[in-house]
Amino acid sequence: MTALESMWVSFFGIFLMFVSAGATIFAQKLPSILRFIVLVIAFICLVIGGIIMIVIVFGGPLAE
């Protein structure tokens, strides 16, 4: 993976974390079953974003 591809993947991970935070805030105004569904989706986004960040950070610097 090139440095540019790594940058875009990390941006996607950050985007997923923002989606997770926004969905969590939005879920506070929903009824119970919809709240549960939105929070599960937010948790999945958070976990995937975290895994992406861990892979990118521990992947180390990329040699060109």
Image: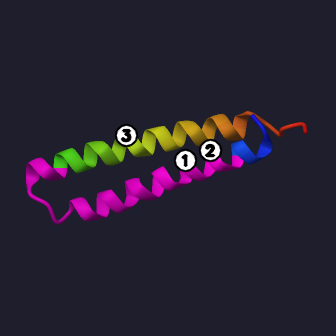
x then y, percent, for residue 41: 30, 44
Q: Which residue is mark 2?
A: 9
Query: Does the magenta-highlighted stretch encompass residue 3?
Result: no
- Mark 2 or mark 3, earlier in chain: 2
Distance from label 2 to label 1 (Cα)? Answer: 6 Å
Q: Is residue 40 above or below residue 21?
A: above
Q: For label 2, count other residues whose C-alpha is less than 10 Å away and answer few (under 14), some (14-19) or many (20+).
A: some
User: Residue visible at 41% across and 44% down?
Assistant: 45
Q: Which residue is mark 1?
A: 13
User: In which quarter of the view is residue 9 placed?
Assistant: top right
Counting the numbered discs, the total is 3
Q: Amino acid at mark 1?
A: Gly
- Horizontal side, residue 37 vs residue 64: left or right: left
Q: Amino acid at mark 2?
A: Val
- Horizontal side, residue 63 vs residue 17: left or right: right
Classify the position of the C terminus by image quarter. top right
User: Residue visible at 10% across and 47% down?
Assistant: 33
- The span picked out in magenta is 7-35
Q: Nearer the viewer, residue 58 or 12?
A: 12
- Horizontal side, residue 31 vs residue 29: left or right: left
Q: Are marks 2 and 1 in contact (CB under 8 Å)?
A: yes
Numbered disc 1: secondary structure: helix
Say which mark, if any, is on residue 44: 3
Q: Are marks 3 and 1 in contact (CB under 8 Å)?
A: no
Q: Amino acid at mark 3?
A: Ile
Q: For label 1, count other residues whose C-alpha is less than 10 Å away and answer few (under 14), some (14-19) or many (20+).
A: many
Distance from label 3 to label 1 (Cα)? Answer: 12 Å
Q: For label 3, count other residues whose C-alpha is less than 10 Å away and answer few (under 14), some (14-19) or many (20+).
A: some
